[in-house]
Image (tube, coloured by chain):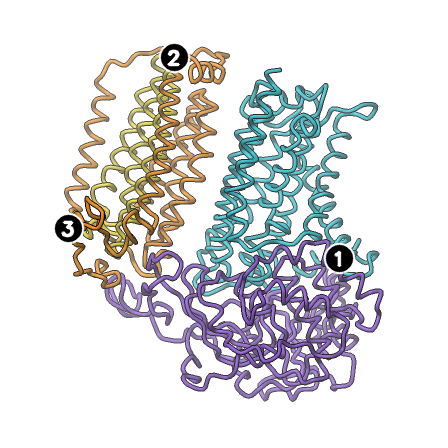
Chain colours: A cyan, B orange, C yellow, D purple
């Protein structure tokens, strides 16, 4: 029960924190006043709530409503495997990493459905494009995650945390965290991996959405950012492990750190055209994840 | 009736109903994802059957597979959204008969056979068992599956790519002669080519 | 939740799958039927493993093999659809009246 | 009328505006980007106020009406140095020399407080063709292929440039207000998936005139950065005061550090020996210069560069040319001009 409350609290706090950091970073890069950016998330929320929701011509209504809701649920489900302290997790199962992987895979489905359901060309192109990039990105993350399971000798997330008592995985498997961050950008549709909601398609899967629907999708994206950051902090940065402060505090701090990194990358690094990214994913990044896996295996056998 | 019994019947009903919807919806994308939901219901039953790894792995795999399925649906169907009614069937009555017969036969077999009763002991380390089996006693089978998948990948690329060994796949190709400069071996590709686009989709 | 109940559910899935595989003209829909049959097989395998035989490790191995078969069926199926479409502009089984090039 | 707390909160946000640029108005639009009162959005679905900046061309008027009707309620239109249409009821009129910021802000607050009425549609909300009633299921024709559901003809297969898999192609028009294209340019594109099979110029880009070269350049670089998913940097670029050397040099450093140049594939859109990356690099280097830089007589046609390119690459190629070069590269094509008019698949600002 405490774990469930903790998950919901962390999600809510993460959505607020993510929105604020995002607005501040955007204002800083855009050369606009940073102070008003602190209130910007609330104002934008109010603005979106006071606008009409769009209905396109003959949309797939069921999926149009389900997609943002499912995205939010996936964020919560993904976060549920993260332990806040020894033994305190909503789903403390021996296959936590596989469950997280299933959430990743379903994000691809949800984003595609979001683009599909509007029954309009630009969202559909966005959805298609996202599938092409999102699937290989997800494959890479699975290899990287299996790498972290090797020293823990378990697919359970708690065991992965405990295996980092001496040395965190970010140091033990130096390729792991950077590759995993790519997935984070991909499943939250951000910056260099924003192929679903991209600007050249005037918002891609979001091109035909306004009002509450837009707000929901935005919120779900930020919730997923929180869930991913907590997962990255747990699997690569030792999660709740740390001196002096209590365990949950460490987890929150590390989560915030990962979120900051992702937000910075979002606004500072350019995105390459999809065809080029697809080539890189299959020919450079996927082999790199194999190297990471071999590295992790050799290290675990030591 | 315990809680897990109720869950089992709910998921069973879900699995069968979504499976039925696959062939009854006009929208091809919905059909793909109805199939995905059917798999998810079965995965939930697997979880109830104390097979946690298999259950979650099924969800993981089917999410990806059905995503690809939906893509191919949109690609190849001329009306993927089902804006027009969609009923592309042949030998319909025979198929219904075969489906009913299969269900009746298998169902009768299930009801009439004296089935063994020996449930998994609670607390059995099933995931560890699976791991040691995969990489221990049955390693050869597991590796064979892996190699087969690799072969599948190669075969898939060969089959679907345009550039063939002897020319573009859609132009028809002839292997070169058996001796250098000789007559091309094999039959000349026919130039009839029923390239009437979507010729098959009559009313 | 008895083994008989599980086998009945699996039989229903296999029945629907067989109907789909036999009746659908479109290749992709046909493959959905095949997938459903395998879905039923997976349920049967795990059902026997869990309730009938007391969880022998090889039962789970069989389920993994079934999943691999599904993946292979999908991949080869789609490759064939693409190859046929390239040549014949057709995505239905009637487009394959002849195996000739 | 008392505003609700929600509306008060919303009214403090920068006014989301979509700018429809008309003749001779390119330079003034830059000032909007620098204003703290407004946030220029690139999607009409996000906008609350449509700014018609300068008189639209006669042939763009219908497109503008369609654009307006895509804006979600509550909405309004501001006419900045332009004559309002007859159907535009209570128009916000801003004279050409004024800063529209304060007026927009008060109109926005009035809209949210429901003091000001939201504008009704300017065009009838009908499907382009009747479709209901025919066929077994009222789908507008016989069988699965027949009819024109919702007035759209069924997609038909066509040849494909990428790998010859002849799937359903899709023809539609983007522009003249598409945010990733230079103002005024409208293209009719035929797509297979996201690969462009053929392109035709429906409307040429607006001619900016000699004195707007500097402003056009920062707008073009801004569009380019947005295509590279650097929205915040694009805003900085659009708002940067061109006479402030430090600010401009700082901007160039930001752009360099973001790997924007290296993100563009080499050899993309090669024309007269230069590829898109080289043109963009030169354009960034020339930021802050007032005089126009142009490829000396580029020669060639824009529509010949596009087929075979993926959507994002095609937009990168288009925006790698300076506005003046584009005017030369994409001249008005006289034949079939009226053909696409009234076609069901007009997409003006963006999607549907």
Query: Given contact means CB atoms under 8 Å apart, are the residues at marks 3 and 2 in contact?
Result: no
Which residue occupies the foreground of this view, C31 or D232?
Answer: D232
Residue A266, given in percent of the width and then of the height, sits at 68, 50
Q: How far apart are marks 1 and 2 (CA)?
A: 62 Å
Q: Distance between the residues labelled 3 and 1?
A: 62 Å
- Residue D72 visible (yes or no): no
User: In which quadrant of the rendered view does residue A41 lie?
Assistant: bottom right
Residue assigned mark 3: B187
Residue A245, given in percent of the width and then of the height, sits at 82, 26
Which residue occupies the foreground of this view, C81 or B93?
Answer: C81
Which of the chains bears the disc numbered 1? D
Residue B164, given in percent of the width and then of the height, sits at 30, 48
Left or right side of B167 for A202? right
Nearer to us: label 3 or label 2? 3
**Residue drawn at 25 percent across, 21 percent down:** B110
On screen, D184 above or below A178? below
On screen, D57 above or below B10? below
Query: How many marks can you see?
Result: 3
Query: Given contact means CB atoms under 8 Å apart, are the residues at marks 1 and 2 in contact?
Result: no
Nearer to us: label 3 or label 1? 3
Which of the chains bears the disc numbered 2? C
Quadrant that contains the N terminus of chain C = top left
Residue assigned mark 2: C56
Residue assigned mark 1: D254
Q: Distance between the residues labelled 3 and 2?
A: 54 Å
Which residue occupies the foreground of this view, D302 or D141?
Answer: D302
Which of the chains bears the disc numbered 3? B
Secondary structure beneath dot 1 equals helix
Query: Given contact means CB atoms under 8 Å apart, are the residues at marks 3 and 1 in contact?
Result: no
């Amino acid at each position: 029960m405490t774990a469930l409350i903790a998950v919901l609290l962390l999600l809510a706090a993460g959505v607020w924190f993510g929105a604020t950091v995002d607005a501040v970073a955007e204002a800083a890069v855009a050369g606009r006043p940073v102070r008003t950016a602190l209130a910007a998330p609330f104002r934008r929320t109010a603005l979106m709530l006071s606008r009409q929701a769009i209905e396109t011509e003959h949309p797939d209504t069921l999926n149009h409503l389900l997609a943002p809701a499912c995205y939010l649920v996936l964020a919560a489900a993904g976060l549920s495997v993260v332990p806040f302290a020894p033994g305190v997790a909503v789903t403390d199962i021996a296959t936590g990493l596989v469950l997280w992987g299933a959430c990743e895979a379903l994000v691809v489905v949800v984003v595609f459905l979001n683009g599909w359901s509007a029954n309009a060309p630009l969202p559909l192109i966005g959805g298609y494009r996202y599938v092409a990039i999102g699937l290989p990105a997800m494959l890479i993350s699975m290899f990287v995650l299996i790498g972290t399971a090797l020293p823990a000798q378990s697919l359970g997330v708690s065991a992965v945390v405990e295996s980092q008592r001496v040395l965190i995985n970010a140091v033990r498997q130096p390729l792991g965290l950077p590759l995993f961050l790519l997935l984070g950008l991909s499943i939250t549709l951000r910056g260099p991996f924003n192929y679903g909601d991209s600007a050249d398609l005037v918002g891609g899967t979001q091109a035909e959405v306004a009002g509450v629907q837009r707000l929901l999708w935005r919120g779900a994206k930020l919730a997923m950012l929180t869930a991913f950051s907590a997962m990255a902090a747990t699997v690569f940065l030792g999660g709740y492990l740390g001196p002096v402060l209590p365990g949950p505090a460490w987890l929150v701090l590390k989560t915030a750190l990962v979120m900051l990194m992702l937000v910075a990358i979002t606004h500072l690094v350019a995105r390459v055209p999809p065809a080029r990214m697809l080539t890189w994913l299959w020919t450079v990044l996927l082999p790199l994840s194999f190297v990471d896996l071999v590295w992790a295996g050799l290290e675990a056998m030591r | 009736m315990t809680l897990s019994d109720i869950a089992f019947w709910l998921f069973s009903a879900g699995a069968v109903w979504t499976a039925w919807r696959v062939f009854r919806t006009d929208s091809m994308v919905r059909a793909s994802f109805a199939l995905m939901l059917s798999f998810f219901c079965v995965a939930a039953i697997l979880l109830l059957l104390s097979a946690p790894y298999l259950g979650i792995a099924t969800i993981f795999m089917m999410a990806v597979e059905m995503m690809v399925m939906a893509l191919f649906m949109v690609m190849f169907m001329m009306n993927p959204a089902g804006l027009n009614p969609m009923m592309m069937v042949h030998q319909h009555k025979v198929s219904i008969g075969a489906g009913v017969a299969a269900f009746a036969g298998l169902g009768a077999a299930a009801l009439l056979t004296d089935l063994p009763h020996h449930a998994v002991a609670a607390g059995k380390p099933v995931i560890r068992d699976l791991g040691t089996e995969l990489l221990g006693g049955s390693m050869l089978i597991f590796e064979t599956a892996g190699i087969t998948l690799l072969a599948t990948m190669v075969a898939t690329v060969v089959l679907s790519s345009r550039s063939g060994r002897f020319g573009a796949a859609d132009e028809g190709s002839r292997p070169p002669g058996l001796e250098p400069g000789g007559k091309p071996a094999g039959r000349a590709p026919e130039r009839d080519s029923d390239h009437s686009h979507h010729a098959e989709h009559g009313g | 939740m008895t083994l008989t109940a599980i086998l009945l559910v699996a039989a229903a899935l296999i029945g629907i799958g067989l109907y789909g595989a036999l009746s659908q003209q479109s290749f992709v829909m046909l493959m959905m039927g095949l997938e459903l049959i395998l879905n039923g097989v997976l349920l049967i395998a795990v059902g026997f493993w869990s309730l009938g035989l007391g969880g022998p490790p090889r039962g789970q191995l069989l389920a993994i093999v079934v999943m691999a078969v599904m993946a292979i069926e999908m991949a080869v199926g789609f490759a064939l659809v693409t190859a046929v479409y390239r040549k014949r502009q057709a995505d239905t089984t009637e487009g394959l009246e002849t195996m000739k090039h | 009328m008392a505003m609700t707390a929600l509306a008060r909160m919303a009214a403090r946000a920068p006014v989301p505006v979509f700018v429809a640029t008309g003749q001779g108005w390119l330079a003034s639009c830059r000032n909007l980007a620098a204003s703290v009162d407004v946030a220029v959005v690139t999607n009409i679905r996000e906008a609350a106020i449509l700014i018609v900046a300068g008189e639209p061309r006669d042939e763009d008027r219908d497109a503008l009406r369609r654009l307006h009707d895509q804006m979600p309620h509550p909405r309004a239109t501001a006419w900045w140095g332009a004559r309002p249409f007859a159907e535009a009821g209570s128009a916000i009129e801003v004279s050409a020399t004024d800063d529209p910021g304060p007026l927009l802000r008060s109109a926005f607050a009035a809209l949210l407080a429901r003091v000001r009425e939201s504008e009704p549609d300017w065009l009838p909300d009908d499907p382009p063709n009747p479709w209901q009633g025919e066929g077994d299921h009222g789908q507008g024709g016989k069988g699965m292929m027949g009819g024109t559901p919702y007035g759209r003809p069924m997609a038909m297969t066509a040849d494909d440039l990428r790998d010859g898999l002849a799937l359903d192609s899709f023809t539609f028009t983007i522009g003249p207000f598409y945010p990733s294209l230079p103002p005024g340019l409208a293209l009719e594109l035929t797509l297979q998936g996201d690969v462009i099979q053929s392109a035709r110029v429906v409307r040429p880009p607006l001619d900016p005139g000699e004195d707007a070269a500097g402003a056009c350049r920062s707008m073009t670089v801004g569009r380019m950065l947005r295509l590279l998913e650097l929205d915040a940097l694009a805003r900085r670029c659009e708002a940067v005061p061109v006479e402030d050397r430090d600010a401009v040099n700082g901007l160039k450093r930001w752009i360099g550090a973001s790997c924007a140049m290296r993100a563009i594939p080499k050899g993309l859109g090669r024309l007269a020996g230069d590829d898109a990356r080289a043109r963009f690099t030169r354009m960034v280097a020339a930021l802050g210069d007032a005089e126009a830089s142009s490829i000396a007589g580029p020669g060639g046609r824009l529509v010949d560069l596009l087929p075979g390119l993926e959507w994002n690459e095609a937009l990168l190629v288009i925006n790698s040319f300076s506005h003046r070069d584009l005017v030369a590269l994409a001249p008005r094509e006289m034949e079939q001009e009226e053909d696409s008019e009234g076609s069901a698949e007009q997409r003006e600002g963006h999607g549907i």
